[in-house]
Image: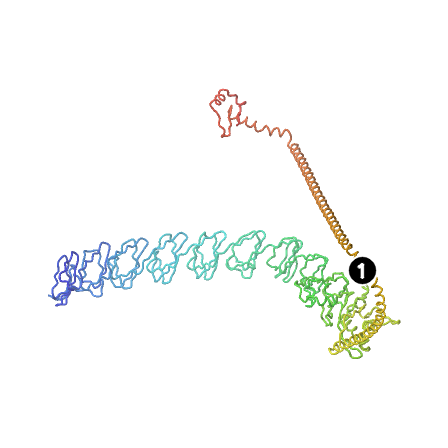
Amino acid sequence: MDQTVFRMAPKTYIHVLDATTNITRVEVGPRTFVRQENEQVVLGPESMITVPSRHYVIIENPVIRDAEGQLVYEGDGAHKQVKLKHAEQEIRLACDPFPLWPGEVLRQSVTPLTIVKADTALKLRAVLDFEDQAAGVSRVAGDEWLFRGPGTYTPRVEVQVDLVLQATIILPNQSLRVRARKEMKDHMGVDRVTGEEWLVSQVGAYLPGVFEEVIRTVDAIVLTDKVALHVRALKTFSDVFGKERRTGEEWLITTEDTDTYIPGIYEDVVAEVEITVLTNRQYAVVLNPCGENGRPDLGAKKQVVGPAQFFLKPGEELQDGAVQEIHVLSEDSGLVLKAIEAFTDDFPAKGAVKRNPGDRWMVRGPTEFVPPVHVEVVAHRRAIPLDDSEGIYVRDTQTGAVRAVIGETYMLNENEELWDKTLPPQVEELLSDSRDPMMDRTSDAHAMAKAKGKGKGRREKSRVVSFRVPHNAACQLYDFKQKKARVVFGPEMVMLQPDEQFTQLSLSGGKPKRPNEIQSLCLLLGPDFCTDIIVIETADHARLQVQLSYNWHFDVDQNDPEAAAALFSVPDFVGDLCKAVASRVRGAVAGVQFDDFHKNSAKIIRSSVFGLTNEGKVKDMFQFSANKLCITSIDIQSAEPVDQRTRDALQKSVQLAIEITTNSQEAAARHEAQRLEQEARGRLERQKIQDEAEAESSRMKLLELQASSAAVESSGQAKAEAQSRAEAARIEGEAAVKQAELKASAQKIEAEAELERLQAARKAELDYIQKQDELELAKAAKLAEMERVKFESMVAAIGSDTLLAMAQAGPEMQVKLLQGLGIQSTLITDGKSPINLFQTANGLIGGAAPAASGTTTEQ
């Protein structure tokens, strides 16, 4: 430092290094210090350290002082310097200001002493061995203890503050769970081993000991009439009620034991148990009920019928996990029961009956039934109401017999169950189709339009299968058990017995006919028609494609079972019909030429199918003897060659024939025209000569006429023009008059129609208003009459004396009240209208009448 003179204020100091001796000394103010050549100021000037009351500082490498407090130096003479405690610390409390000697370090600045409040403590640990004179004990390194408040803690270099402990407030219904970190005695003087836990329940502030560790605060569990505590023992101990509990034991704590409960160290709270409440319409079956010793009786059952309330004890549980409702059986319901063990059934409806395991019986309503614990409810049965067209399939579980119950309300008994009738998938599809069966026509027009989709509904298999047979149709049912078939004619509702099945029809369809195109359950009896396309070949090998339409019907006696069964003897009557007709037509056409067939196709085909009578006429009908199917007519809709070359040749021949006919007719017409032309030319020459002769004579007459006509022409033209203009004017006038007459007539008709409409509307409105007024008058008269009758009835019911007494009751009561109060006169007002009381009061006071005859003025 280049500065030579240092003026130091009081309470300041500097460190001066003597370069000659290499010793640093302290110079303290107030003074003026002049630095020598061999000296150097290495620190300062600095203010002295002032430690006020209740503060402290920590000095590292402090100076050594003797017993009298004087500094201890080392060396002698000019080489004397202050001796230090190296690597040590010193805590200095409130004292006079002091400088830092060379080598001393201010490790911690001026710090207030730690004030330990009430319910607070410092956890101290000795880092060096020392004698604690305040406590009168010797501390070794590693010792731990508490400095409890309230108080001021004076620090020591041998002691380290590890932790500030706050007291834990223990409220009512609370406990503190504490663990011992090493062997010790607690605040109650009880010896504790390392790791031991216990509860501190004293209400107030609790400051744990130095070797105590607070785990958590345990709140008491509030027990009510509806909540209990399920507790398990973690080890063998005696609980707060003085009862010994073994490891793993479980029990309930209810309000009968205590209102609030704090679980102990060796107790584990399993759950809070809600009370089970049973109404008078409920019951419960308790599994593994606890006996008198408090242990569950495994495998046993106990039934509790309401009204009741109870807690499920440990190990107990409700059957099916819930409270059961009492079975209330009506007249159309019942319960199927099965005994799971032997017992005596004393149900009132049956009396005392001994039941063996596996027995089944049924309880029918109306009644209330609570199943005993020995009984299992197999099923709940309800009566099934059935209409005349409804039924169910019922199977006896003992005999296996299946029967159909139709048209009655039926309830299954204990040995019966619903039986599902299975039908083929195609039959199920036809039954589920929502369309009317009449739409399932076997004719081609309807067959091509028939939908391929399935029905939306699903049949309930236990219900009797029903099918509506449409009018003029038949349906066959086959009983596999009796091996018999029956035919039902429509309109009729068919209901299948358990062993019956539908005879499904698979008919040909399309053009030409293809098998299995139409699926149906009923057979239409006709009359109907079908169309087919067949290929035929003539004797000259011309192949033709013919489209034929047949009208058919079934000729059957519905009262004859054999004839009815014959209807279904041919599975595909449409295919057989078309095949038989096609065979006959092919055979007949094969023996004729193309030209003959082209000219007489209808006769050839009809005669081939229907046959001829002895007189050579075509018969009217063709019948199949197997199923009584009759064909009544055949219509040929088209006939075209199959081979394209034949079709082209036929077209060319037709065109050639047309051309030849046209040419011949054209030639004949030309020859006739030439002949007529020659004849006309001869007649023309003769006529020409005659005309020339007549022309000369006529020319003379012409000249005469020309002269006369020239005179007439001049006058006639003017006359004709005048007549034409007059005629035109006359026609135009007549047309205008006619138009005006028609327009007037139309307006007259419109006016008359509008007048009639208005008259009708006014008349209808007047009639409506008149009738409405009449109804209102009638209504008012009836209401008045009703009120009169009502009033007369009320008056008659109450009586005239009663009414008189009611009318006089108010004033008489007021008079009696005033008489009882002793008031001779009163003035009653509504409080809104002003009253002149100056003169009124004089009249009231001066002329007061007796109390019995007091005057009441009401305003």
Relative image position of residue 378 (x, y in whole percent)? 63, 60
Query: Residue under circle 1?
Result: 706
Residue 653 higher or lower than 840, as above or below? below
Report x, y in % for residue 273. 49, 56
Q: Is residue 77 left or right of residue 694?
A: left
Q: Is residue 256 visible?
A: no
Mark 1 neighbour density, 10 Å: few (under 14) some (14–19) many (20 or more): few
Residue furthest to the top in view is 846
Helix, strand or loop at mark 1: helix
Where the N terminus falls, by quadrant? bottom left
Quarter of the figure with residue 131: bottom left
Instruction: Please tell me whether residue 540 is drawn above or below residue 80 in the rendered image.
Output: below
On screen, residue 265 versus residue 464, left or right, reads: left
Q: Nearer the viewer, residue 190 or 199?
A: 199
**Residue 804 visible from this viewpoint:** yes
In depth, the one of 47 and 719 nearer the eye is: 719
Q: Residue furthest left?
A: 77
Residue reaching furthest to the right: 615
Q: How many marks?
A: 1
Q: Nearer the viewer, residue 329 or 305?
A: 329
Q: Is residue 667 above or below residue 129?
A: below
Whether residue 765 is situated above or below residue 316 in the rendered picture:
above
Check disc 1 and give the amino acid type.
Answer: Gln
Instruction: Name the side, left or right, on which 155 lies relative to 633.
Output: left
Q: Quadrant of residue 349?
A: bottom right
On the image, the x and y values in percent for residue 87 come to 22, 66
Across and down, in percent, residue 688 comes to: 84, 69
Colouring of the image: rainbow
